[in-house]
Image (cartoon, rainbow, N blue to C red):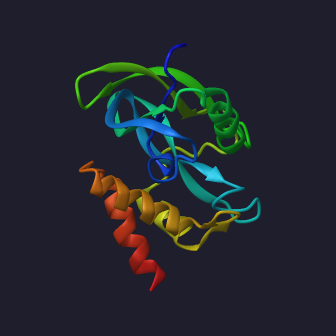
Amino acid sequence: MGAALWVFGYGSLIWHPDFPVAERHVARLAGWHRSFCMRSIHHRGTVADPGLVLALDRAEGAHCDGVAFRVAQGAEAATLATLRERELVSSAYIEEWLEVGLADGRRVTALCYVIDPAHGQYCGGLPLEEQAGIIATATGGRGPNRDYLFSTAEHLAALGIADGDLDWLARRVRQLAT
């Protein structure tokens, strides 16, 4: 048996991993934060009207709480292929193998998709109000951008993971959408 494959989810992977999962645990990744810092031109927006999707953006002293998934034994190669097709569609994400702390105290090395700040789709530092305006109206191949935000915020809350920015964005986008 080879080493286990762990994947860290911080956005849509939390609620739609799309691979066979043997274990899942709330986990923390230090030195990164969850941020709507990537323009989406495929899944939640278009080239003409980009949406925003979450990415892990490096930040000194920050952390991101999410979910670590251990891929079912025997499904590692297929999972990597599926994730690469899904996450590397525009090369704005970079694959990194980073240590995450599981809620049960274990530390594992997990595959993480982090933003490439040199990529043209990177847009870190947008004010929350501007993010809300974009998310409220953009739609891409996987549906409205706001659905991505709402589902992520709801699943984080169900897991007991607090994210003030996402909660604020969800409230504001609901106001803008009415």
Count the labels in the image.
0
**Which quarter of the rendering shows the C terminus?**
bottom left
Q: Where is residue 41 in the image (x, y as percent from the top left)?
A: 71, 55
Which one is in front, 55 or 81? 81
**As drawn, which residue projects farthest toward the top?**
2
Quarter where residue 34 is shown? top left
Residue shown at 46%/53% (left/top)? 15
Q: Nearer the viewer, residue 166 or 148?
A: 148
As drawn, the residue found furthest toward the bottom would be: 178
- In the rendering, at what x and y percent does residue 80 appear? 65, 31
Whether 58 is drawn above or below 134: the answer is: above
* Residue drawn 49% across the image and 20% down it: 4
Image coordinates of residue 151 in percent, x first then y, are 44, 62
Left or right of 29 on screen, residue 95: right
Residue at 44% over, 48% down = 14
Foreground pick, 9 / 125: 9
The residue that appears at 36% across and 57% down in the rendered structure is 155
Question: Residue extending furthest right?
Answer: 48
Q: Is residue 134 left or right of residue 150?
A: right
Picture quadrant where residue 62 is located: top left
**Residue 164 in the image: above or below residue 86:** below
- Residue 82: x %, y % from top left: 68, 39
